[in-house]
Image (tube, grey):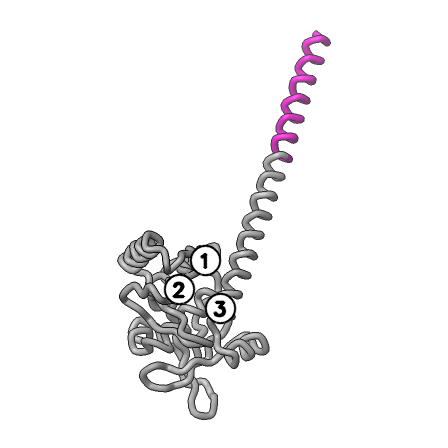
């Protein structure tokens, strides 16, 4: 009987140890996966930011680096828009005094890093403002 | 060397080609048509801060960027 008890306790201990080791290994794998994903996201953000800056005018680049936003001029209306470095509702329509009169929101239908979104918005407003605003959502 | 820049989740994917190489230009044109056919918008850089939307492949363009179809946010 004591031998059976001892064997049972040893087996239980073995199971617990295996579960513990398995849990630790799984946690390590998940942590590495998360770290890799975070690295990929950082790299993507940096790449998008570099591309954006390459396509900005010198004045826009200066505004973006200083304020985190830049201004573009609509291709049809000549209105000024401020594109802020955010993913949604980030386009301010400005009046002659630089005050916000409306907020617009449109962007690429697939996931892109923020810099790419801002560049797509800039190109759209500067080249085909009407088409861009036709699909955009407007807020105040 | 000309470059086609396709925006994606990694930031972008770049395809470089020699405009003097007919086969490379043909491949770039095929890529252009495939991307725009799939709904991407193409824009060519025309100088500091200036760009132009293009609907036809421009073999003389040094840098063309492609971004996915736009939608209201």
Task: Identify the residue at horizontal 32%, vertical 76% (top origin).
Answer: A128
Per the image, the residue denoted by label 2 is B65
- Secondary structure under tag 2 reads strand
- The segment highlighted magenta reads A1-24
- Where residue A94 appears, as percent x and y from the top left, is 43, 85
Q: Earlier in the sequence, mark 2 or mark 1?
A: 1
Residue A52 marker: 3
Q: Is residue A88 magenta?
A: no
Query: In the figure, is residue A101 to the left or right of A129?
Result: right
Q: Is residue B31 visible?
A: no
Is the stretch drawn in magenta largely helix, strand or loop?
A: helix
Q: Quadrant of residue B58?
A: bottom left
User: In which quadrant is the C terminus of chain B drawn?
Assistant: bottom left
Check if mark 2 and mark 1 are on a common chain: yes
Q: Please, is residue A64 above or below residue B19 in the view?
A: below
Task: Identify the residue at horizontal 46%, vertical 76% (top origin).
Answer: B48
Q: Is residue B13 visible?
A: yes
Is mark 2 in CB contact (under 8 Å) with mark 1?
yes
Per the image, the residue denoted by label 1 is B12
| Chain to which the residue tagged by mark 3 belongs | A
Q: Please, is residue B52 above or below residue A31 in the view?
A: below
Task: Identify the residue at horizontal 31%, vertical 58% (top origin).
Answer: B32
Who is closer to the viewer here, A17 or B20? B20
Is mark 1 in CB contact (under 8 Å) with mark 3?
no
- Secondary structure under tag 3 reads helix
């Amino acid at each position: 009987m004591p031998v059976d008890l001892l064997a049972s306790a040893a087996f239980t201990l073995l199971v617990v140890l295996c579960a513990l080791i398995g849990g630790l290994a799984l946690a390590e794998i998940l942590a590495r996966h998360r770290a890799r994903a975070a690295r990929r996201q950082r790299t993507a953000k940096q790449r998008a930011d570099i591309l954006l800056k390459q396509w900005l005018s010198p004045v826009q680049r200066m505004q973006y680096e200083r304020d985190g936003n830049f201004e573009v001029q609509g291709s049809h209306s000549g209105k000024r828009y401020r594109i802020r470095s955010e993913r949604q509702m980030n386009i301010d329509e400005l009046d002659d005094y630089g005050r916000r009169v409306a907020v617009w929101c449109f962007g690429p239908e697939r996931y892109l890093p923020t810099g790419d979104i801002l560049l797509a918005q800039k190109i759209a407003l500067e080249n085909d403002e009407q088409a861009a605003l036709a699909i955009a959502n407007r807020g105040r | 060397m000309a470059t086609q820049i396709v925006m994606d989740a990694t930031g972008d994917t770049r395809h470089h080609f020699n405009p003097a190489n007919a086969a490379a230009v043909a491949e770039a044109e095929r890529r252009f048509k495939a991307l725009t056919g799939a709904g991407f918008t193409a824009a060519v850089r025309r100088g500091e801060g200036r760009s132009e939307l293009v609907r036809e492949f421009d073999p003389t363009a040094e840098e063309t960027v492609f971004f996915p179809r736009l939608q209201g946010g």
